[in-house]
Amino acid sequence: MSELEARSRYTPAEVEPRIVERWLASGIYHPDAAGEAAENYSLAIPPPNVTGVLHMGHALNSSIQDCLTRYQRMGGRRTKWILGTDHAGIATQTQVERLLAQEGTSRAALGRERFVERVWEWRGSYGGRIIEQLERLGASADFDAERFTLDEGYVRAVQHVFVALYEKGLIYRDRYMVNWDPGSRSAISDLEVEDREVTDTLYYVDYPLASGSGAVTVATVRPETMLADTAIAVNPGDERYRRLVGETAILPLVGRRLKIIADDYVRPDFGTGALKITPGHDPNDFEIGRRHGLPQLTTIGEDGRITADAPSRFAGLRTAEARVAVVAALREQGLIARAEEYVHTVPFSHRSGERIEPLVSLQWFMRMDELARPAIDVVKSGQVRFHPQRWGRVYLDWMENIRPWCISRQLWWGHQIPVWYRDDETYVGTTAPAGEGWERDPDVLDTWFSSALWPFATLGWPERTPELRAFYPTDALSTARDIIFLWVARMIMLGLEFTGEIPFSDVYVHSIIQAPDGRRMSKSLGTGIDPLDLIEGGARPPVFAPVVGDGPDPGEFPAYGADAVRWGLLAMSSGQDVRFSEDKVAQGQQLTNKLWNASRLILLRVDPATRAAARPVAVEDRWILSRLRHAREALGASIEHYDFSRAALELYDFVFSELCDWYLELVKQRLYDGDGDTATTLLYVLTETLVLAHPLIPFVTEEIYSYVPGAEGLLAARVREPLLAEADPAAEAELGRLIEAVQALRGWRNSAEVRPGASLPARLNADGYERTAVQLARQARLDLSANGGTAVASVPIPGGVVVILASDQLDLGAAERKREAVRAELRSGVERCERKLANPGFVAKAPAAVIQAERDKLARLQAELDAL
RNA sequence: GGGCGCGUAGCUCAGUGGGAGAGCGCUCGCUUCACACGCGAGAGGUCGGUGGUUCGAAACCACCCGUGCCCACCA
């Protein structure tokens, strides 16, 4: 007990690490693989990159998932939060390559086998950091069954899927236009490309006609690609060029003969209406080229440099250099008719940040339309629900226009494609083919290919494991919207294809937390916070400077503790993006501190032999039991509806407004007096409050629980029991009256400038206070025992008035001013009601209950006014 | 070009048809034996604008202004 007695402030920094150890040692995070998925509860974490460190998005999403997990676990269901990390192909490979560069070596020097070994070593040393951070946050995930998207069983699952889809004809190899990322030297998918606005120059270039009679002028922002031009296209309806269709132009600098063709794609009103066609280096031209059977030439290589197939003066130049050189050469020949500034969007690699080079390349693709169909149906039918709902529409829009997915990556770190080649033969299988001379495809799969199997591959699929039966399909998926297409959609498609079931029934799309200035939280911008710095205290970046000084060092966050951070993040989040608010974290800290101190009041006064039970002796006991039931129901509904900010605020309101401000103040005296039933009930209310609060603020509640007499085991493992009291509207009405009356009297005292400690002689002239008059007197500091005396003021309260009697405690002038103010307020209220009730439309059309409520209100206000 | 959000108190945000709310900040008062990271009482808003629907609009509809995001192959 000494700790509880000694600390009038809750100290998370000392408590939390100790609690983490108890939870981890208890084994409650790791459920038995028993029962069926329908009765059990499970959810899979979006696997953080193995290179990752905890950022605010992780902290928010983990707070959400842990709230769900703890809530369901305490609801008595076998609950599993599937945990693990993603091998994150490009990110991890880049990280290790950087390390090698520092050591003066390189991937190429090591060779594939040694390099991959190095990555595994790296993962062994540094890859677990985010997992430890999740533990520190209080995440109750299954740490004993941590998975990795490249561990042995997972590799088998991925290969199985690849082979099956290949055999079904959905995976194929093709020479096709891809987004080539010169930074990572790999193809990437459409989803990994981001468009940025760029100011370029639009050049008008003359292509002389072979006939020698003039030239056709084309407009281009990428003159360097002209080296691979194989045609010129115009719109078939364009009168200006009609007679040129079928003619031939001469490609400047190269001399190649280009056919002039007609294609509807060309817009007559843009540029000159004539378009140079480069099937090898532009996605649109690629399509046009296919339509017209044009050759695809390649003059830009995978290294982003001009190839030897181009005129030698350009070979080896980077594209940017080549552009300058080509323009200079054209100028020399007087072929640049015009040049103007041009703002447009250009694709960049999301990964490396480099400008995408569209290239024709031999890659593996996956056809998605067939897989999309059932995945569209399950969302349309409501089997899979998005929260907020509107994200379902976004999902469907994308799915209905889905395109093939380029799944091969020219990396070493990842799932190597299970395909072998020998001369013209191709072998696809989960094990190497027999015989000599087979060469395995060097490429690996897009990381998202393996992520798409996450909810079932982590449970042992394709084996029919007990885990799979117990926990698949999962229940919920909580994620940010930026991976709805990259990940969520693909999990639904592959889940349906390979397990025949939806991978989860609810997708919660949480908000994104921005920096206080509205920018994205990002380390490089200086707008990011390490959540651990909030939890344990640490550097406060300048954009997070407190508006008012709040401590010795504004450059440091105080150690708010994990509960405060979790509560704050939940309270901040909602359906829309929000700016990070340190105030909300501070509010969470106040909540933990309040609960700590309320518990001290109770636990330091009750006899250790007391056991929690509901033994209401006064109406306020019935009231708090009724409010407790209300809070449990409201909070439960909010969590089940994924409304976490509401849940957080409901908890705060219950603890502050109902439990501490009113109930504890009302029963304090009885507790001091040593009343046994009061102690018993208080212990019950406290225990159930801890149960209520635990999913949101697990640490402080677990710590307090350890001091509760008779409480055994861990609060985290406790199952919610049915509450011992029903809703009690009569008690709620009675206490509602009391609270309103006390507030009215306190307000009156304040404005009448009555000394706070003074007890005022008064007469209670109101109905409905038979059982609460003593409390009314105590809370409002009235002396109701006085008889006689001159009435000097009359304070309206529900059901009547309190008449204040003359005493030397009172400044009559101030009291009179207050009385006038109250009178004016009541009058305007009465007028508003009368006006409404005089409106024939209102009386005729409004619902009867609304009209009656209005009449009641008028009567009440009028009575209060009359009483003055 | 298409789509989806958002605009409510000084700040950050709840509130989706019947008397404008919370936290922080601000003002006044209080060393009341759980908590000064506290307690009590207040001030503060033409709910972006215009028009409409309705007995009644912060909420529903239309348009406008401002702002953010997503999707899209116009050189």
Image (tube, helix red, strand yellow):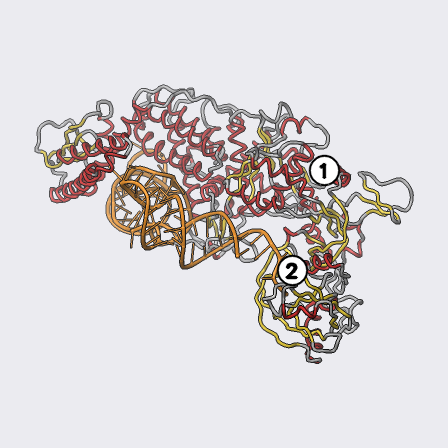
Q: In this rendering, does residue A538 appear at all? A: no
Position of residue B49 relative to residue A643, above or below, is below
In the image, taking residue A401 as reference, residue A301 lies left or right, namely right
- Say which residue label 1 marks: A154
Q: Nearer the viewer, mark 1 or mark 2?
A: 2
**Location of the N terminus of chain A (image quadrant):** top left
Local secondary structure at mark 1: helix
Residue A625 in the image: state x and y as whole percent.
37, 24
Tell me which amino acid carries mark 1: Tyr
> Residue A607's image quarter?
top left
Tell me which amino acid carries mark 2: Asp
Residue A301 in the image: state x and y as whole percent.
75, 62
Disc 1: host chain: A
In space, the residues marked 1 and 2 are separated at their CA atoms by 48 Å
In the image, taking residue A177 as reference, residue A685 lies left or right, namely left
In the image, taking residue A108 as reference, residue A67 lies left or right, namely left
Count of picture labels? 2
* Residue nearest the viewer, comparing A23 with A168: A168
- Label at residue A264: 2
- Label at residue A489: none
Residue A762 in the image: state x and y as whole percent.
15, 31
* Residue nearest the viewer, comparing A651 with A156: A156
Disc 2: host chain: A
In the image, taking residue A534 as reference, residue A607 lies left or right, namely left
* Residue nearest the viewer, comparing A262 with A494: A262
